[in-house]
Image (spheres, rainbow, N blue to C red):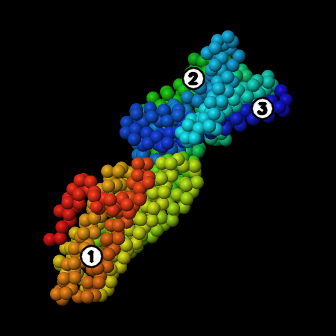
Amino acid sequence: MNIFNIIAAVGGLAFFMYGMNTLSSGLEKASGGLLEKVLAKMSGNIFTSIFFGAVVTAAVQSSTATTVIVIGLVNAGILKLRGAVGIIMGANIGTTMTAQILRLTKLEGSGEGNFFINFIKPTNFSAILAIAGIILIMFSKRSKKKNVGEILIGVAILFTGMTIMRNAVEPMAQMEIFKKIFRVLENPLLGILAGAVVTVCTQSSAAAVGILQAISGSGAIVFASAFPIIMGTNIGTCVTPLLSSLNSSKNAKRAGLLHFYFNLIGTIIFLIAIYTIQYTVGWSFWDKEFTTGDIANFHTIFNIVVTCIFIPFAGLLEKLACMTVRDKPGEDDDELEEDTLDERFLVTPNVAIAQTSEAVVQMGIQAQKNFKSVVALYEEYSPKLVEKIREREDTIDRLEDRVGQYLIKLNDCGLNEDESRKVTAYFHLISEYERIGDYTINILETAQALFDEEVEFSPDAKKELSVVFAAISEIIELAIKATKTMEIEDMIEIEPLEEVVDRLVEELKAIHINRAKSGICKVDVGVHFIDILTNVERISDHCSNIAVYLLASRQEYSTLKKHEYLEKLHRNGPKTYEEKIEEYSKKYVIA
């Protein structure tokens, strides 16, 4: 053994880590957001949650990545905490797939003369994958094929790194100090600590187990030392998700703790069971060599058994996390949590976009609350309510700045076409919702002016305003719904109501002019009435803009031009468009 063996081992580790990162990145890009959608939609049942958690983790080759995705979805309000429990359990099973794949390195030096065995040997197979991958990356024009090439290159580098590590470690295994180190690690606490530290350093339990498999090829690993190290990797893999959840919502913190408690309690149970049997009956394989395949099998069995143990207690695991991160006394769950945009999730654009979507929806909800509160001022003026409205307006303004900055950073994260269209739409939407908030404040100031001047509208004027206020409240609701669902059916619901609002405003202006001419309405009061109509019409226009921008975020409408779309719709709209206009006209009629 010489210095070059050490350099080769470290270099092999560098190849191995880079291969895992490239593979994970390529799989994430190739999924096009499918992984996040699957996790969000398939979390209703504990068994389906576990299954899809395992499948997604096997796909991205990292339980840490899956758990970070889950925390992002919980933080964005897309995934409930109960649904996260099963996915996190499944993630621990899925991460064992890497170790099962890496056991193929044991085929080196065997199967001479057998074509199939020679074909799947890591040195040969990785070369074939590398050739195919580089061809796709260099000569394909489509990003999807380039992503597949990146996946193939990632697997090739992964196997190459593993092979280099194995070859470099073999001479080290003959050294007495190397053997002593692993004898020391038979101490369960030291073994767990070593496994946890390596996992934290590599940011992946699969990578840590892979390193252990590489060393096992030298014959230096026995079950007594491998067992606690594997236990430690399961605890170490919790660190990154826990750190990712620190600046997130309460439920996101709880999701990070779910992962930690699951692995910690599972490790404790296994430690007690294994060592109790060892010191009473004894394990026949305790001091025997632990091979690459043995490590892969034990890693898989451990995570499957622990998951089976926890399935009946999933609810208790959730309660434990909730007890750790408690709700504050008197805290209003309906109040907005502004800090939902975590920059650590920018590495997973689809999660970051999901968080952005929730923040934009929250802007709409705050604007809607403000509008309803302003309407209430025309029934009974309240200085306290005015103060609350202005506080919400400040929140909307802060959200616009926060989301805008987040979108700028997100835009630099190598987005695909679909993600890029969504980011563009959200840039527009935050401005539209902010303007809705501004026009609502204008209506608030009109209410204040009426209160200060000690005048009020006539009963007829109040009834007329109540009709248009109800229509505006509904169109804001439709805009929020479309932003939340991103469904075309919800987007096209907005424009017919906008057309009805325009007609209502024109009708009310004509009625007001007649009242002014007949002397029923005073000029100064009439000015306030017109101001309100002007502002509600602009709110309606901004809701229409939201619908158009959302439509443009869809691939089939990516070339949509707003003025052409609206002109075509108004001149020769589809039958459903005219039917909706008639429906809203009957609903919002001036008596």
| Mark sitting on residue 297 | 2
> Split into 4 quadrants, where in the image is the C terminus?
bottom left
| Badge 1 or badge 3: first in the primary sequence | 3
Between disc 2 and disc 1, the foreground one is: 1
- The quadrant holding residue 264 is top right
Q: Residue at x 38, y 58 (%)?
A: 548
Label 1 Cα crowd, 10 Å radius (few <14 / some 14-19 / many 20+): many
From this viewpoint, which residue is outermost toward the left?
591
Residue type for callout 2: Asn
Viewer can see residue 392:
yes
Q: What secondary structure is found at the residue carrying circle 1? A: loop
* Residue with the mark numbered 3: 8
Tell me residue 124's x, y (percent).
67, 23
Task: Give the mark nearest the N terminus, 3 or 2.
Answer: 3
445 or 228: which is nearer to us? 445
What's the residue type where badge 1 is placed? Tyr
Determine which residue is flagged by label 1. Answer: 378
Q: Secondary structure at mark 2?
A: helix
